[in-house]
Each structure stands twice: as C-alpha cells, then as structure tokens.
Image (cartoon, rainbow, N blue to C red):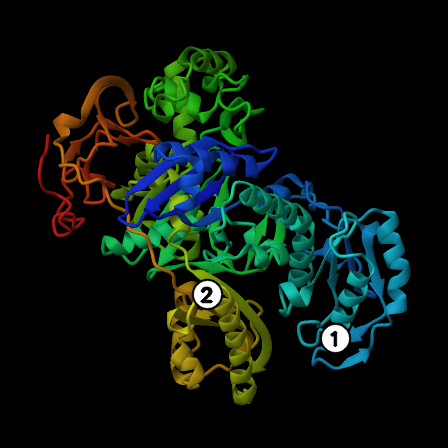
Amino acid sequence: MKYKIGIDIGGTFTDLIAIDGKGNALVHKILSTPHDPSEGFVQGLRELAQMAQMSFPDFLAQVDGIVHGTTVATNALLTLRGAKTALITTQGFRDALEMRRGVREERYNNRYVNVPPLAPRHLRFTVDERTESNGNVIKALDVADLEPIVAAIRKQKVEAVAICFMHAYRNADNERKAVEYLRAQWPEGHADTPFITASHEVLPSIRFYERVSTTVVNAFVGPIVSRYFHKLLEQLREIAYHGPLLVMQSNGGVVSPDVVTKIPAVTVLSGPAAAPTAGAWYAQRMGWANCITVDMGGTSFDAALVVDNQCITSTDGSINRYRVALPSLDIVTIGAGGGSIGWINQGGLLQMGPQSAGAMPGPVCYGRGGLLPTCTDADVVLGYLNPGFFAGGHMNLDKVKATKAIDQNLGQPLGLDTVQTAAGMYRIINSNMAQGVRQISIERGFDPREFLFIVAGGAGAIHAGEICRELEIPMFLVPNVSSIFCAAGMLLGDLKHNYIRSFYTSFSHLDKNRFLELFMEMEARGLAQLAAEGVPVSQVERRPVLDMRYQGQYHEVQLDCDWHDIVNLHLTAIFDAFHTEHNRQFGYSLREENTEMELINLRLQVVGMVEKPKFTLSGSAALSASEARKEWREIYLPGSAHMQQVPIYDGDLNICGATLHGPCIVEKVTTSILVPETHDCQVDTLGSFIVYQKGMESVLGLVELGTIHATTE
C-alpha cells in the first residue's frame, strides 16, 4: 500500500501524517530536534514505520512522496542566526536598507529602536552603475569595480552576498554581469563559496526598499537553508528513500528542493502556510466558502483567512520586522503556545508569553528541567490534560511540579490559590489569541462571526471555546487531524509558482501588446517549471493578479482576475471588479467620478493541480457516546469558574454521528478537546468534531449537513 507523507517541523513538535490510497492515516508527533531538524525528520519516518508494523526499508519502499514544511528560514530570521551577509548596490544607496521607509512602525514611541540591518554597514558596498526607470542603461557596470569588493568579502569571510541595483526590475543587465563575475571568483561547491543572489532572481518588482530587503533576507537565510536541504537529501539517500520530496512555500504551494535552495526566502512561512490550505478543504466539504484557521502549537499561535475557497495572500509581509515582499499567505503569528511562559510585569499584572519554554526544557510538567510555569502547566492543573495519557501515554506529565511552579512563581506573589492562578493564565492566553484573530479578520474588514472557525494544533481545541466566546463565534470545527493540521495540509497543497513584472502605466495609455506579452512570458516560465516537475498542461491553472490603484494614490489594491478576462482584454470587467474590491477594503469607490486607474505590477501564479488524498476513518462500526466514555474527571469550567466532574470520551474511537453534551473532554492521542458547559459537540462522518452553542443545531445548518444523527447521550 503506497503512502504519501506530510512532515511539519515546528519549534516544539515535529508532526507527521502518512495516508495510504484508501485514506487510512497514521498520525504521529515527536519532539523536534532544534540542533538538527533533519534528525527529527528521519526519526519520525522510523516511528511511522513502527506504527505501520513494517520494517523501515519496506516502509520506505511504499512511500510515494513526502511533502515537508520547515521553520529553518523562519528561525534564522527570528533568532538572527543566519549567514554573515554583504550587500552590493548602486552608488548613493548604501544606507537604503537601514533607512527603510524612513518611518518608525510605532511613530509615537521615541524609544522605539530600528532592527539591526541583516547586512551591517561595513559589509554594504556600492558600485558606479545606473539604469533609468525606463530600463535604459546610462552607466554600464565595470567589473573592475568589483575586484576590491571581492577582496573585502574574502577577508571578512562573508557567507552570503545580495546584489540589488536601482531599476534592475526593468533591466537586469548590470545585475547579471555582477552575478556572473562574482560566481566566477569562487569554485562551485567549495566550502568558502558564498551564497550569491540578485534582486532580479528573487523579486523583479518596483519599490527599491522592498526589493533590497527581500533580496538581503534571501541571502541571510540562503546558506543555512541550503545546508539543511543538502544534509536532508543526503540522509534520505543513506536510508534508501528515492521518491520525490516537495517543500511547502509561504504561498501555500509546494516546490522542489532545487527551487528552495535558489530562493530560500519562499519558505519563511513554510510551516504555517499549510493550515489555510487544509482549512479550505475542510470548509468546502462542509459547504462553507469562508473560514478562519487557527493553529496553536508549542511556541506560537497562527491565524489565517480563507475567502471564497481561496487562501488570502499578501506581498506586504514581514518576519521579525524584516520586510519580505514575496507572495505569502496572510498569516498573523503571535507568541502564544503551549510553552508560553507566565510572568508578572512591573505593574504586578499577570502576563502570558511571548517567551516560550520550547521543546527543551519545555513546560515544567514535562520533567525536562523547566522551572517557569507555562500554558501547558496551567492546562494540567485545570484538568484539561490527562497526566497519564499525554501523547497516548508515551509521556507522563508531572502535575505536582506544575502546581508547585505556578504557586511559587505566580500564585503567591499575586495572592491567589493555584487553581485561580492557572485559570487566570488560561483566560489571558485565550484573550491574546482572540486578539490575533481580530488582526486577521476585523482589521481587514471581515466579520469573524460569518466564518467557519477551524481549530488546529495540539493545544488549540482546549482553548477554542473561550476564544470563540470572546469573538461571539457560535461554532468551531476540530478536524480529525487537527493536531497535525499543517502536516495534513501539506498533502493538500498544489504545486505553485509565482511571477511578477512591474508595468507602471495608466489604463488610458495601456500598451495592450506589452501587457499580454508580459503575461505570456510569465505563463511560459510557469508551464516550463511545472513540466519539469511532471505536471501536464491539462492540470494547470493560471491565476492572474493586477496591482491597481486610482491615480494619485500611493497604496494599491491586489485584484484577483480571471485569466479569460486577461487574455481577451476585458477591461470593463476588470474595472468593475476593482471598484467593488476598493469599496470593500476602504469603504468607498470612485466609479461615478470616472477617476483614472493605474497599473503597478502584473502577477501570475501558475498552479499545478495534484491529486488530493482522502481522509477516512477505519471501517469499524460506529460506537455510541456512552460506549466511548473512558472516565470522569474534575476540570475547571471557565463559564462558571469552578471545578466539576465531567465525562471524558475517547476521541480515537469511531463515534461518527454521536452527540456529546458539554461540559466534557474528548481525548485523542495527539490532542484534547474541551467542550464548554454552554456547548454540545457533533462528530461528523470524517471523525471531526463540530462544537456549537447549545440549541443552535438548525440555525447553524448542522442537521441539513447530515452531521447530527445516530446516537446521543
């Protein structure tokens, strides 16, 4: 039986899922190995083989493909432990990287300090070259000017070089000449050869700061990402895995490792990008076009939007305040996870995170040397986690140590007992996560109450009820693979390649031939790349986007267009869509004023559609809720603020169609679900859990979907 495998390496856990042709899934979580993520990758494969009751070589022979999400680039940016990076740019623009846009993010905070540039000033070099905005080269590059720069790079033992010249997006001749010269100075594959990248390879787009910042980020993470994938591929060869390996991009699509090693910046949101992809699949199955996905892991909390069955993307992203203008899914990430540490601020108020205990030493209850109380410790004290059944019983949690840490570090200074303190920790981190959901929805003009709320992550379903209460969301869905949701989403991702061409013009002066020529050029590149990856033309989708604005505006709107309207120049349809989208985002349009519109950039995403795996349950007969009840346990009820005995159900049994009345806990090997006292829970035909406010079955359409049937208790 052939398997497809998704592997998501996070800051605390590595999530794995293997699905066979019938849709049967093996789901597993192991602690990550931060010192070398590839070790956890291979160890996870070995443990999947054990779960499949096969020898490791036999299991690998049955693996038909692996899709991998990695946080290597993300962590390099977050910890500033990337490569020693130099920048070569046009004379007069040495400090543009550090000057940024010239505006503090917190403009009224006089103490707000700029982030240190990834290429320090003594490693920023300039050359006397110049290209005009129309693409005319008025000063050709003299490669002799690069000789002292190469000498300085050697002397400083620079590991990565970014090249970004003015207006190279219109004409990259000078950049290409610089790249060719620099790459010729070092033997290919030599240990001292720096990673060399240029803006026309990474982001051939207007706006110099965005282009130079993205190119420098690409250089900064380049060596560490390249080394990681070279080592990973070497290990896969050593264990005799010869199948395909694909890597998740920030845009929600997958690509080959060859693409990633050339432009590693496409993976800065590799792991979180898979959650909206999986969310779109689950939402569509339930008849919803719009959903919010949230993923609470050990270190962070990610929230993303899906609108009209499409994951929302953005080119306005930043990681750790470093600008990355490549297309990526619009994801809000905050430091709120199971490892988030509780602390008391100078004003004597309880806070949660963003500091995290991570995988090592981890929460106090892990017994790995952690001393500071975390969200997971609070969940243990409040009864939401079973100390003897964490990770299916493979890892025992120490409730006594967790209780002591909360009491000594937080409870006594605050004058509260242990349960009150743990409940406060629970409320605060829930409020933090609710604010993250507001950022991705309300602040972007969407009402979260109109979206299906999909909860993922090992800890997410314990906290979802209170997040939804604060946001007035009546229902949330916990997929049957929620604990490894990103790993599952990786198997649902298509091959995606993004291209951009700057094309600044008003529509009244539009050169239609050049307009079409640029789109055809991008399409040809995308088709060639997909053909190399084995995707036939019949499985290709083309998704064009126009960056448009009214004349006189500074910020543009990214308008999703129909390929048919582009190739047939149906401008009226494009104009109507722009007015409508501008009105949605900003509350007004200038349709009646007949205001001139301008083009800034042309974008094209070329998508190779791949066959999606099925997610099914075993063929065993469905059990009733009473048959799935394991025990009774005392837990804290957030609505009434007291401890109470509630039933605990085995969520790994087939209880499709069962109704579970709150309050209760559903325990799975990889996650636990808190059904509040104000909610009930339905189990659908895929084994997913639909938690909804009592009495709202018909309002939410659950009866019509056929999810409410069979047994109740």
For the residue pair 392 and 547, the one nearer the viewer reads as 392
In this rendering, would 234 be left or right of 296?
A: right
Residue drawn 55% across and 22% down? 361
Check disc 1 and report the residue beneath it.
Answer: 173
In this rendering, would 664 be left or right of 51?
A: left
| Quarter holding residue 54 | top left
Instruction: Tell me the element at label 2.
Output: loop
In this rendering, would 470 be left or right of 425?
A: left
Residue drawn 43% across and 38% down? 15
Residue 62: assigned label: none
Q: Amino acid at mark 1?
A: Asp
Q: Residues within 10 Å of mark 1 (few under 14, many from 20)?
A: some
Instruction: For residue 93, say whether it is visible.
Output: no
In this rendering, would 654 be left or right of 283?
A: left
Classify 630 as above or below 522.
above
| Quarter holding residue 345 | top right
Classify 490 as above or below 508.
above
Distance in Å between CA atoms under marks 2 and 1: 32 Å
Residue drawn 81% across and 80% down? 138
Residue 534: assigned label: 2
Instruction: For residue 701, say whether it is visible.
Output: yes
Classify 51 as above or below 120.
above
Residue 390, position as x, y percentages in the image: 37, 23
Q: Residues within 10 Å of mark 2 (few under 14, many from 20)?
A: few
